[in-house]
Amino acid sequence: MASRKTSHPNRDSEDKYSILLPTYNERENLPLIVWLLVKYFGESGYNYEIIVIDDGSPDGTLEVAEQLQKIYGEDKILLRPRAKKLGLGTAYIHGMKHATGNFIFIMDADLSHHPKFIPEFIEKQKEGNYDLVSGTRYQGSGGVYGWDLRRKLISRGANFLSQVLLRPGASDLTGSFRLYKKAVLDSLVERCVSKGYVFQMEMIVRARQLNYTIGEVPISFVDRVYGESKLGGNEIVSFVKGLITLFATT
Amino acid sequence: MTKLLEWLFGVSLVGAVWALVSFDLLDLSLPQTYREVAWPMPLYLLVSFGCYSLATVGYRVATFNDCEEAAKELQGQIKEAKEDLRRRGLKM
């Protein structure tokens, strides 16, 4: 046992983790996130597969994904492309159809979510047999990098307002680095209709409504290294609309 | 019950109690001081909640962790990843 622990401590576990990576124009980031995932899953020894759901990126993300599949193997990298950009919710449904894991990770492919936290998510899940574990930027050692004062203020303000109105029992409502039991994600994704930031919020609010248990892990969120980060007036308006909708309907 | 209904329920409950005491609707002949205290109470509550909100959000913005280390670590790993991937034959 001791010798096994040093190399692959979790290889004998029955659990398998499917990582869903919805991508759109991520040819720079995809190889890096995959490399990091392989590194941290390799070190911790958990069984995994990476499912890339590319929505017809014009920048050739899919072609890079195919190269990665050759490097890391077809059992580790699965490609489930779609012809054009459709919603996040349908991307998860599409990806899950082919997922063979009993647990599903969802995270952004733009390197703002670091795979080094994955073992912590898994340990947290096992600790309380949680139905879902959510990464949080707002608690403990969690935090952000690359945000100015305005962005921090909007984020904290929006979070406070949502907490007051919805009392969801989780500190990071709009975060999108989460681990779900597969059946739980199945049932949630079916019910959630929102778009954008609100989608993640609806997922956690519905989870609470359905009495699923939620664990939290502090994460550092490093804002997009490549590409533009977006938080304009449009996002704020649609966030407020979504918040009001959830307030009135859940 | 939706969150909206919960709120409406809570607000009307508080409102009813407030009206009962402030206007002595049930003729309980409450002491005058009760009525004087109760009358401006909604405004006090609103103002204190506003202050609490501002203080909380302000404190949280001020103590929002800046993850300099995480960003540096990531930059290093990106370099490492690129070299390794190139060695394995990835054309970026």
Image (cartoon, coloured by chain):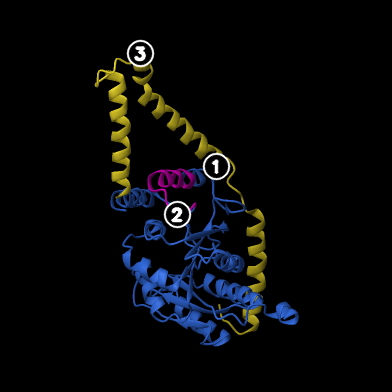
* For residue B49, side relative to residue A16 (left or right): left
* For residue A245, side relative to residue B52 (left or right): left
Residue beneath disc 2:
A173
Front residue of this view, candidates A164 and A145: A164
Query: Is A110 in the magenta?
Result: no
In the rendered structure, the colour chosen for chain A is blue
- Could you tell me how far apart the alpha carbons at marks 2 and 3 are, in whole angstroms? 47 Å
- Could you tell me how far apart the alpha carbons at marks 1 and 2 are, in whole angstroms? 16 Å
Q: Residue at x 51, y 46 (%)?
A: A152
Query: Is A159 in the magenta?
Result: yes
* Numbered range of the magenta stretch: A155-171
Q: Position of residue A178 (x, y in %)?
A: 49, 64
Q: Nearer the viewer, mark 2 or mark 3?
A: 3
Residue B31 circle label: 3
Q: Which comes before the other along the chain, label 1 or label 3? A: 3
Please give the letter of the chain rendered in yellow. B
Q: Nearer the viewer, mark 1 or mark 3?
A: 3
Q: Position of residue B62 (x, y in %)?
A: 58, 40
Q: Is residue A144 above or below residue A61?
A: above
Residue B60 circle label: 1
Q: Residue at x 64, y 75 (%)?
A: A44
Please state which amino acid type lies under the numbered disc 2: Leu
